[in-house]
Image (tube, rainbow, N blue to C red):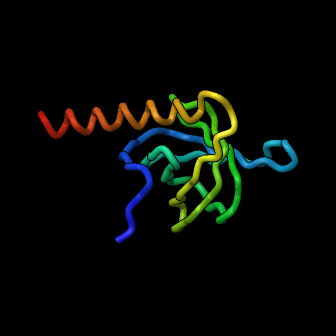
Amino acid sequence: MHSRRFPRFSIDRPLNAVIYWEDHPIRKLTGRGRMIGQGGLLASLADQLYVGEIVKLEMSPIPPVYATVRNTRGTEHGFEFLFSRDGQRSAVQALCAACAEEHRSEKAG
């Protein structure tokens, strides 16, 4: 049995995936974040990306973060975060902690 490095939490948030070419945005896909963990995100997008592509993900309340496409199934994509700036990792950790607390509250009540 394969265990994950980080727990994952269900979410439902709007997001944009921006594809760049030589530092210029060339394509922007809209979608929904479906599941998040400290290492990555599962999202449904309006179009399909390719495994290995690197995109900038924009999803409130975390700052924009680059991610690589690790897997796809149609328009559902698994992303691995590529943290490059201060605050990105801690913002994702804070969102995961809030999701964990929400999940505990739902179970308790």
Residue at horizontal 46%, vertical 35%? Answer: 93
Quadrant of the rendering where the C terminus is positioned? top left
89 lies left or right of 6: right
Farthest residue, direction bottom = 1
Residue at horizontal 56%, vertical 35%? Answer: 89
Residue at horizontal 59%, vertical 62%? Answer: 70
Give the image location of residue 2, x and y in percent.
Answer: 39, 68
Give the image location of residue 100, x and y in percent.
Answer: 31, 38
Quarter holding residue 24? top right
Give the image location of residue 67, x and y in percent.
Answer: 64, 49
Farthest residue, direction left = 109
Quarter holding residue 47? bottom right
Q: Is residue 66 above or below residue 75?
A: above
Q: How many marks do you count on the picture? A: 0
Farthest residue, direction right = 22
Give the image location of residue 95, x and y in percent.
Answer: 43, 33
Q: Nearer the viewer, residue 13 or 85?
A: 85
31 lies left or right of 53: left
Quadrant of the rendering where the N terminus is positioned? bottom left
